[in-house]
Amino acid sequence: MTEIGAVLPELSIDLTPTVVVSTALATMDFTPVHHDTQLARAQGSKDIFLNILTTMGLVERYVTDWAGPESVIKRINVKLGVPAYAGDRLSFNGTVVSHEDGQVTVEVRGKVSLGDHATGTVTLMLPEENARC
Amino acid sequence: MSEAKPMTDEELHELADKQAALGEVRGTPAPDPVNVPMIRHWLAAMGDENPVYLDKGVAPPAMAQVWTMQGLRPTAKDRSPVDDIMAALNAGGYTGVVATNCEQTYHRYARLGERLTPATRFTGLAGPKKTALGVGFFATWNVTWYAEDDEPVAEMLFRVLKFRPPAAKAPAKAPAEALKEPYPLRPAINQDTAFFWEGVQKGELRIQSCADCGLLRHPPGPLCPHCRSAGRSYTVASGEGTLYSYVVHHHPPVPGREPPFVVGVVELPEGVRIVGNVVDCPLDEVRIGMPLRVTYRPMDDELVLPMWTPGES
């Protein structure tokens, strides 16, 4: 499953206002644009939107859902794109792009209706590599 | 000492070099050690069912930043080497902000009971560059989270684009509206007040606090009237208030304003009073003691002012 070019199963998350607000609070981010619709709109946003800590957390979840609980995340590099607004749907896709020196790197793309919300790479160690350490 | 004058590109880069030369600046340790309730809350919100964290007593690595978020705690905010750069960019009209990169490296997973301490290092300012959002500067900094024994647990590179929202874009966004005339009254943004106006840009109503005794004060000033400390910090107000006093302004004419309008003194539950306009309320319904809620009104393509609108009682 970890050869180069292997594709991760897609994960789609409906970004209900509850998801946007509960993740903002779970990440201790009380910036109003993540929970106050009126204020987010007054500042030119379409709606409340996901915060960056959540984007990082969802990327982490996407990759560990696939790699399993024994995998160890070493690095997450994310380039941030369009906002992920409440009411939209965030779909993750991923491909294994390298597997060497005991480490697997997955390229991840999180898309919403406006385009790429997050693109980047996640580097992790998988169980067999852990066992060898 | 006032620095209302925007800096030149060269001066901005000089300031950036100065902040970078400060090296790593330690912040306040996390208020709570790594703990199960916060991990459980995070996992549930993320929909993450990975059992490893609770089984092995470690935190999801992407939570590194969460432990040291300020949240709603009315405590002193750490002054980081990034703050002055952001203030200078805002003063220069680069008021837009959008994060472009977040890169985290985990040396190991944080363990239950560990209390992490962040340390921030400003690493670079690039620009001015033309971007799709407008002309702007890319500011980059690093945060490292240390365990009690000074072992680095995780680090993060964070990059934002601070851009000048292009005036020409406004009609495209709101075709019905003509390009807004620049509002003639500009707030005095200086070292004492920059934090307040930065907050307004973010939708935060900030109150200056004494970094030593914690006393809140408004309007902002250089010295604590209670303990004479020059150490400054701020807290973010809830945005609720009650009308303490007001006048209705009819005359003389005020540039950029249409009389009559209400100038109120609003008492905040945090304990200070703040002056602002009361809007969205017929004049004859304005009453001392009425509950208010802060709102942010764009006055032109750059300036946003906090105002007060009737709130739920």
Image: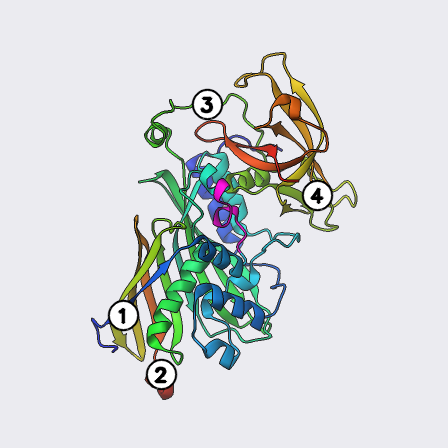
Read off the residue under disc 4. Answer: B269
Dot 3 lies on which element? loop
Q: Dot 2 corresponds to which residue?
A: A127
Q: Quadrant of the N terminus of chain B?
A: top right
Identified at 44% across, 59% down, the residue is A54
Check the image and name the residue furthest to the top: B252
Residue picked out by circle 1: A8
Residue under disc 3 on the same chain as residue under disc 2: no
Looking at the image, is mark 3 or mark 4 earlier in the sequence? Answer: 3
Q: Is residue B71 magenta?
A: no
Marks 1 and 3 belong to one chain: no
Question: Could you give the CA–CA distance between mark 1 and mark 3, rounded to whole angstroms?
Answer: 51 Å
The magenta stretch is A29-38
According to the image, label 3 marks what residue?
Answer: B182
The answer to whether B142 appears left or right of B268 in the picture is left
Chain of the residue under the numbered disc 1 shown in the image: A
